[in-house]
Image (tube, rainbow, N blue to C red):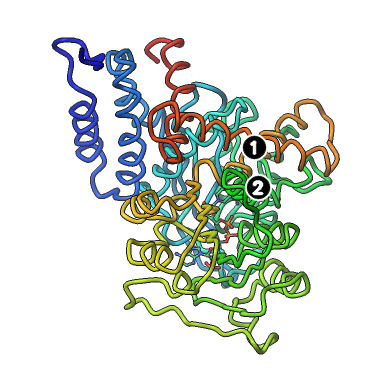
């Protein structure tokens, strides 16, 4: 007897998925990152649609790939020379089925509508996995904070918030940081929101500790990603102790990934930035990490300077003509891509696999191309996809929201303990869901399906909105 649940006259899951994918491409042309993110999720959902034809009847896939609202606006500001500059601001409010929109703001010259739509789409499933009541959103601007004075950054943030404030609120949409948006930017954004609205609320997360921030929020994405890697290794009765680890980027996520790796006695050996890769064969210890934190967060310098201070380290400058990233050619046990999207292509994945990598835990959003992901899964690498492995950041943002609502502040230990438990729960959900849907060990399917079900069922409950 056939096990298919597809009713007569309805399209088979594979056909339905292809139809939705074609629609997404037609409606959102020239947005390859958005297509990539949708493709990855829809590929996993074939397994769900087989069992649940009701999602197709309610056109859940057509609805979940269409943002509830997109705001795009002009951001004019004066630079230090008194010259007018004009940037473009965005906020994508993707899905609010399970809570207010929640997701970071990215300030980077590469920002465009398609990149933010991919990030907002990923955020919907990630936030669902955290177990907390948060919908998905993302925003930002093509503004580049690099090389700008503090005053320029402040004037930009004030202009950006002057428009954004009418679309957000503590029960509507709660932005946070992402690439190019750290504590300094959140401070300027919060100050302007408070001034315009005359209210002190938890409208942003990643705030300073003295004005409503949560302990552990800066550390959360990196720490969470390492906790997730630890859970993956536990399924093989292994641990991070003594493991050589590659970490890309040198920003917020990378720094705290390295810190937690040191806590767990692993050996991180790399950092990078857009200028190149730094490799320290002796390992990055706490003193060297402190140097990087001061270099990046206070002096806002370049990672190349590490090799001027620590002589055994080498620097490999970025060569845009290369068809691979030399960071992933360094032999190691674990990889923590923590810089940006598509930083691991098929060639990089193949090199990592040939060099015997056992764990890939994604701190950055969608750092692996679809082809690279496929190779990791085929090689049975312990592969933690971004929407699960880096969910600790937004989870702790959710904890910051809870503290703001209660007008309370939890201790460092309390927040870290909750973060750790959430990462264990996310891994368990992904692991068990992958198994339940017939693909044991495939945490991509586990994360996509686990994240989807709660959102899709909430959409069904709430009717056609
Ligand atoms: P930061 O701005 O603090 O750091 C980003 C780092 O990545 C910098 O070292 C930057 O180098 C490097 N980088 C950025 N773009 C590129 C590029 N195109 N090529 C090479 N290097 C690049 O950002 P975060 O650490 O916050 O974010 C890193 C990643 O983690 C992103 O994918 C983000 O979406 C994701 N993430 C962040 C969360 C958070 O809580 N902050 C939560 C979940 C995911 P340079 O300075 O030269 O640009």
Measured as percent of width and height from the top left, residue 239 is found at 65, 53
Relative to 245, is 465 above or below? above
The part of the image, by quadrant, that contains residue 22 is top left
For image coordinates 58% across by 43% down, the residue present is 235
Relative to 46, is 150 above or below? below
Which residue corresponds to mark 2? 227
Quarter of the figure that contains the C terminus: top left
Q: Is mark 1 within 8 Å of ligand 1?
A: no
| Mark 2 vs 1: CB contact within 8 A | yes
Quarter of the displayed picture in which ligand 1 can be seen: bottom right
Real-space Cα separation, disc 2 to disc 1, in angstroms: 7 Å
Q: Is residue 415 left or right of residue 95?
A: right
For image coordinates 19% across by 30% down, the residue present is 19
Seen from this angle, which residue lies furthest left? Answer: 9
Disc sitting over residue 424 in the figure: 1
Measured as percent of width and height from the top left, residue 350 is found at 36, 64
Front in this rendered view, residue 159 or 177: 177
Relative to 85, is 443 above or below? above
For image coordinates 71% across by 57% down, the residue present is 260
């Amino acid at each position: 007897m056939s096990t298919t649940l597809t009713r007569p006259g309805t399209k088979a899951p594979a056909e339905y998925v292809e139809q939705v994918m074609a629609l997404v491409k037609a409606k959102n042309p020239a947005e390859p990152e958005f297509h990539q993110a949708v493709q990855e999720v829809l590929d996993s959902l074939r397994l769900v649609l087989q069992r649940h034809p009701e999602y197709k009847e309610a056109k859940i896939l057509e609805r979940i790939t269409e943002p509830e609202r997109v705001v795009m606006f002009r951001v004019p500001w004066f630079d230090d020379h008194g010259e007018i500059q004009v940037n473009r601001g965005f906020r994508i409010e993707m899905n609010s089925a399970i809570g207010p929109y929640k997701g970071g703001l990215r300030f980077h010259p590469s920002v465009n509508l398609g990149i933010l739509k991919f990030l907002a789409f990923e955020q919907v499933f990630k936030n669902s996995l955290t177990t907390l009541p948060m919908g998905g959103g993302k925003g930002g601007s093509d503004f580049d904070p690099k090389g700008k004075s503090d005053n320029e950054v402040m004037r930009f943030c004030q202009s950006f918030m002057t428009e954004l404030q009418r679309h957000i609120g503590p029960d509507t949409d709660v932005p946070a940081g992402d690439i190019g948006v750290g504590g300094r930017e959140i401070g300027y954004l919060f100050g302007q929101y408070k001034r315009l609205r005359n209210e002190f609320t938890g409208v942003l997360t990643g705030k300073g500790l003295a004005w409503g921030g949560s302990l552990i929020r800066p550390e959360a994405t990196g720490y969470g990603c390492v906790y997730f890697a630890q859970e993956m290794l536990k399924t093989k009765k292994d641990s991070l102790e003594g493991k050589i680890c590659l970490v890309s980027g040198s920003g917020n996520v990378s720094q705290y990934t390295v810190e937690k790796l040191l806590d767990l006695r692993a050996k991180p050996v790399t950092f990078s930035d857009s200028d190149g890769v730094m490799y320290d064969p002796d390992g990055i210890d706490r003193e060297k990490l402190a140097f990087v934190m001061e270099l990046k967060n206070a002096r806002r310098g370049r990672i190349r300077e590490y090799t001027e201070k620590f002589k055994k380290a080498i620097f490999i400058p970025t060569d845009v003509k290369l068809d691979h990233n030399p960071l992933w050619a360094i032999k190691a046990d674990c990889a923590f891509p923590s810089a940006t999207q598509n930083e691991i292509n098929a060639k990089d994945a193949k090199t990592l696999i040939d060099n015997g990598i056992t764990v890939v835990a994604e701190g950055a959003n969608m750092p692996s191309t679809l082809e690279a992901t496929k190779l990791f899964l085929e090689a049975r690498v312990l592969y933690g996809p971004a929407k699960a492995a880096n969910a600790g950041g937004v989870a702790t943002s959710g904890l910051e929201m809870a503290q703001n609502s209660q007008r309370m502040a939890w201790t460092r230990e309390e927040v870290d303990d909750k973060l750790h438990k959430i990462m264990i729960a996310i891994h368990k959900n992904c692991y068990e869901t992958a198994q339940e849907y017939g693909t044991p060990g495939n945490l991509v399917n586990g994360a996509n399906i686990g994240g989807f079900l709660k959102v899709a069922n909430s959409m069904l409950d709430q009717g056609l909105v």
